[in-house]
Amino acid sequence: MRNSANRRKIEEWSEADLVPKMTVIWMSESVPNCLLKSTHEGKLVHFTVGKDIPSVVSYLRTSCSLISICLGRFFKKLRTEYPDQYSDLYFHTYDAPFAHMQDDSIKINSTFAIDFYINPMKKHSKSLARLGKP
């Protein structure tokens, strides 16, 4: 049933109101969704927020004074077991992102997780906690 509806749309399509362009591409959602799934499975969508970013370095500390705000203030385990250190926040996709096309727009939905590590993450490879889906 769906194929006949798609065929009808293609047959009714007209170039009359198109502005001249280099090319017009018709694409189904399966193309970007395949690419997004591959990037997720290949672990290509990720970034680390660490002490090398000056604007957040004070917030990543595991210990801070009474008038300061840092991760150690909110997580007792960081404050007691890892005093005077820094945390790395590792952001990554939790599930494969997916695209939804409608009219003139493409929406990409994604679920991210944040893993907490002690800096440097390469040396401390065990995640302390995860914010995201269980």
Image (cartoon, grey):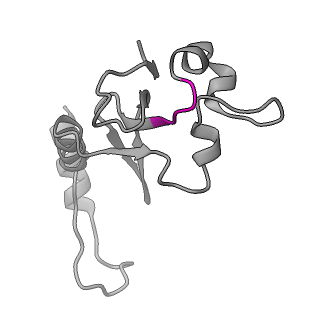
Query: As displayed, is residue 115 above or below residue 37?
Result: above
Give the quadrant of residue 38. top left
- The picture places residue 125, in percent across and down from the top left corner, at 29, 27
Q: Main secondary structure of the magenta part?
A: loop
- In the picture provided, is 121 more to the left or to the right than 75? left
- The picture places residue 31, in percent across and down from the top left corner, at 18, 49
Give the quadrant of residue 114. top left
Query: As displayed, is residue 70 above or below residue 22?
Result: above
Residue at the image point whose x is 57% and y is 38% from the top: 60
Q: From the image, which quarter does the C terminus lie in?
A: top left
Residue at the image point whose x is 51% and y is 55% from the top: 53
- The picture places residue 90, in percent across and down from the top left corner, at 40, 36
- In the picture provided, is 54 more to the left or to the right than 130? right
Query: As displayed, is residue 21 above or below residue 127?
Result: below
Query: As displayed, is residue 122 above or below residue 77?
Result: below
Span highlighted in magenta in the image = 83-88
Residue at the image point whose x is 43% and y is 17% from the top: 133
- The picture places residue 115, in percent across and down from the top left corner, at 41, 27
Front residue of 78/90: it is 78
User: Within the magenta stretch, is there residue 123?
Assistant: no
Front residue of 101/125: it is 125
Front residue of 61/91: it is 61
Residue at the image point whose x is 37% and y is 84% from the top: 19
Give the quadrant of residue 126. top left
Q: From the image, which quarter does the N terminus lie in?
A: top left
